[in-house]
Image (cartoon, rainbow, N blue to C red):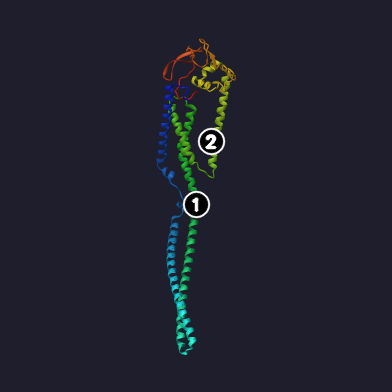
Amino acid sequence: MFRTLRVPDTLFAIAMWAVSATFAGFLIGLGGKLVGEVPGIAPSLTKTLTTADFIDPRARRRLRATSDSLTAAQRTAQDARERATQALTVARNGFASQRATFDAWIATRQATTDSSQNAEVLTRTRTLDSLKRLERDAEVAVEATDVQLLGIAQALEQTRERGVDLEIAARGRFERARQAQELRVFGVRLAFTLPLLLLAGWLVARQRRHDYWPLLRGFVFFAVFAFFVELVPYLPSYGGYVRYGVGIVASAVVGVSLIRAMRRSLAQRRLVVQQSEAERRRALPYEEALRRIGAGVCPGCERAIAGGVAGPGNFCVHCGLRLFDACGACHTRKNAFYPYCPSCGIPAAGGVTEAVAGGGTGPIPAGMPFRLPDQPLP
C-alpha cells in the first residue's frame, strides 16, 4: 500500500501504523487491568471450583473422623496379629520339638519294655497336651485378629462408599455452580467487550476517513483483541450448543453484511458505468488509479486490462474508460492519469489545479482529494 506514496507520505503512513499499534497495546493493558481488579469480580474470574467445595462440611468431618479411627484400629489390629502370629510360631515350634523328643523316648521304652516308666509316659503325654493347647490358643488369637481386621476393612469400605455418595450428591450442585460461574464470567466480559465491539464496528463503517483515523484504528485493534481473546474463550459451553449457536449467529450476520456490501458495490458500479468519462475520472483517486493500472486492472471497473500484440489498449474494453493517451506536445504514449508527460514534462491536457497535498504545493490533477497518507481510499 506504500508503493504509490511519496517518501514523506510513506514515513508518515508507517508512523501512523506505529501509533495505532502502540495505542492499541496500551488500551489492551488497561482493559486487562480493569477486568482483573473490579471489586467483587476478580475472585469469580480466578477461583477454580471443585466438587469438594459442595460437600456437607459436617458430614465430611464425621466421615473423616470415622475413617481416621478405623485406620488407627486397623493398625492396632495388624500389630496384634503380628504378635499373635509370632506366638503361634513359638508354640508350634515348642510342640514339634517336644513331640519329637516324646516319639524318640516312646520308641526306646517299647524296645526295653520297662513297665516302671508308665508314670513318666503319662507325664510326657500331659506335657504334649498342654503344648498343643498353647498352639491352639495362639491359632485362636490369630483367627480373632483376622476377624477384627476383616470387620475394620469392611467398615472402611462402607465409609469410602458413603464418601462417594456425598461426592455424587455434591456433583449436581457443583455443575450448577460451575455453569453459574461461567455465565458470570461471560457476562462480565461481555459487558466490557460488547460496547467496545459495537463502537469499533461503527468506527470502521463510518469514520475511516476521519482525520484522527490512526488513533481510532488503534481502538478497533483493541476491540478485536478484547473480543477474540477476552470473550470468545469464555463462551459457556452447555454441550456445545451456546458455542455453536453464537458461531451460527455471527456467521449469519457477517454473511448478510457481505452480501449487502456486494450488492451496494455492484449497484454503485452500474451507476458509475452510466456516468460520463470525465465524471468517472474525477471520482477516481489519483494514487489508487495509478496503482490499479500498474497492476493491470482498470481503475473504473476493476477488470483486467485487455490488450493485444502491441500491449494494453488505450481504452478499457469493459467500461470504456480511457487508460492511455498521447502527450499533446511530444506525442509520447503515456498513462492517461499522469498530470505531466513523463518524456517532456509538459502538463497533460484535461485540467490541472493548484492545491496542497501531502505536505507540498504544486499542480495536481483535478479531483485528487486531500487525505492522510494511510487514510482509506473512498
User: What amino acid type should be assigned to the residue bearing mark 1?
Assistant: Arg
- The spot of residue 347 in percent (x, y) is 48, 12
| Residue 312 visible somewhere in the drawing | no
107 or 167: nearer the viewer:
107
The answer to whether 313 is drawn above or below residue 22 in the figure is above
Q: Based on the displayed image, in which of its 4 quarters is residue 356 positioned? A: top left
The answer to whether 203 is drawn above or below residue 327 in the figure is below
User: Quick one: SS at disc 2?
Assistant: helix
309 or 119: nearer the viewer:
309
- The spot of residue 14 in percent (x, y) is 43, 27
Q: Residues within 10 Å of mark 2 (few under 14, many from 20)?
A: few
Q: Which mark is residue 315?
A: none
The answer to whether 121 is drawn above or below residue 38 in the figure is below
Q: Which residue is mark 2?
A: 250
User: What amino acid type should be assigned to the residue bearing mark 2?
Assistant: Ala
Q: Residues within 10 Å of mark 1 (few under 14, many from 20)?
A: some
Q: Which residue is mark 1?
A: 171
The answer to whether 333 is drawn above or below residue 71 in the figure is above
| Residue 28 visible somewhere in the drawing | yes
Q: Which residue lies at the image location 57% right of the left edge and 26% below the top edge?
A: 263
Q: Based on the displayed image, in which of its 4 quarters is residue 85 positioned? A: bottom left
Q: Earlier in the sequence, mark 1 or mark 2?
A: 1
Q: Which residue lies at the image location 41% right of the left edge and 43% below the top edge?
A: 42
The CA distance from mark 1 to mark 2 is 34 Å
Q: Which residue lies at the image location 49% right of the left edge and 46% below the top edge?
A: 179
Q: Which residue lies at the image location 49% right of the left edge and 19% below the top edge?
A: 286
User: Quick one: SS at disc 1?
Assistant: helix
